[in-house]
Image (cartoon, rainbow, N blue to C red):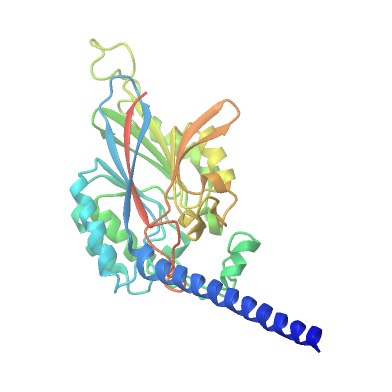
Amino acid sequence: MTRTGASVSAGKITGLSVGGSAALVGAIGLAAFAWGSLVERRRFTLREVSVPVLAHGSAPIRVLHISDLHMAPWQRDKQEWVRGLADLHPDLVVNTGDNLGHAESIPSIAYALQPFRGTPGVFVNGSNDMVGPEMKNPLRYFMGPSKRSGTVRDNLDLAGLHTVFTDLGWLDINNAAESIDLNGTHVEFFGVDDPHIGHDRLDLITRAIDDLRANDPLADEAWPDPEEAAAPRPTVTIGVAHAPYQRILNSFVNHGAQLILAGHTHGGQVCVPGFGALVTNCDIPRRQVKGLSLWNLGLRTAFLNVSAGLGTSIYAPVRFSCPPEATLLTLTAE
């Protein structure tokens, strides 16, 4: 009887211990979710980095990189924070897509970006500039990059979004190339439409760059004056895409990009402290899922900045150990 009683008592203790542990784990999980959904996803952060890509003696260029706003009309705090970025007085804005998080978001995007009117900029599309967010099982992301359903049609106002950007004076570099002169440096851009849904046309980039340079009236001139400088005017080349798939990054490096800007990954969105991102939603290595790094291809190298983005899907409004961000890159002389 004593042994039986001891066994029953131990069973009760074990049961209570397991139950208590489960409750503790549940409480921690609930607290983490509450932090991620109520606090961290609103902790908008400016990340500042220097990138030594300009010619010797060149004046710095301040580039504001904005990505993955996933804007919804009711997200007034995000809209006001983005407006405040204009106080940084960037020389250039680069928008790497996924601006829309709701079918009625065009006025919200226009309001958030209005202070940048007159600031030079370039943009490319993300899939969520064309297709609205869908309810998805988050565990699917562990099975590889998300796929666009074959039954989903474009239901967002991409043309309206482009109108907002062009009214700001920004250049469309979806499968195209453009150039701007900034602070004495000739800045070349080439970009692709969203690779995540197969809209990129890498086959067009070489011709777009060749056409851009052929039509440049100063391409064969020295800068600032042939009599004062024997070297050609300083030029920097920047590649832009929404999703940083390796085939895109490799192609950009082959085409001479010195700096590549991308978004899409949300930095993993939910990260484990000390480990980092669990998923990237593309084939980029986890260690490069956000921030500034180097992308090497053979003997060529480019700086790569992947933005963790400023938003989330309205159906997955949580971030953990990965606050929303914009990036201010100061391009400096090598």
Q: How many marks can you see?
A: 0
Residue 289 x/y as whole percent: 51, 49
Residue 234 x/y as whole percent: 33, 23
Whether residue 65 is visible:
no
* Front in this rendered view, residue 174 or 143: 143
* Front in this rendered view, residue 258 or 170: 258
Whether residue 95 is visible:
yes
Residue 184 x/y as whole percent: 24, 27
- Choose top left, top right, bottom left or bottom right for residue 218: top left
User: Measuring 56% from the left and 38% from the top, which residue is drawn there?
Assistant: 250
User: Measuring 38% from the left and 54% from the top, which residue is drawn there?
Assistant: 67
User: Measuring 29% from the left and 74% from the top, which residue is drawn there?
Assistant: 74
Q: Quadrant of the N terminus?
A: bottom right
Task: Determine the residue located farthest toward the bottom in the rendered image.
Answer: 1
Q: Quadrant of the C terminus?
A: top left
Quick check: 1 above or below 90?
Answer: below
User: Measuring 65% from the left and 63% from the top, which residue is drawn there?
Assistant: 143
Quick check: 260 above or below 226?
Answer: below
Quick check: 187 above or below 229?
Answer: below
Horizontal relation, residue 202 to residue 334: left or right: right
* Front in this rendered view, residue 142 or 161: 142
Horizontal relation, residue 260 to residue 152: left or right: left
Residue 26 x/y as whole percent: 54, 75
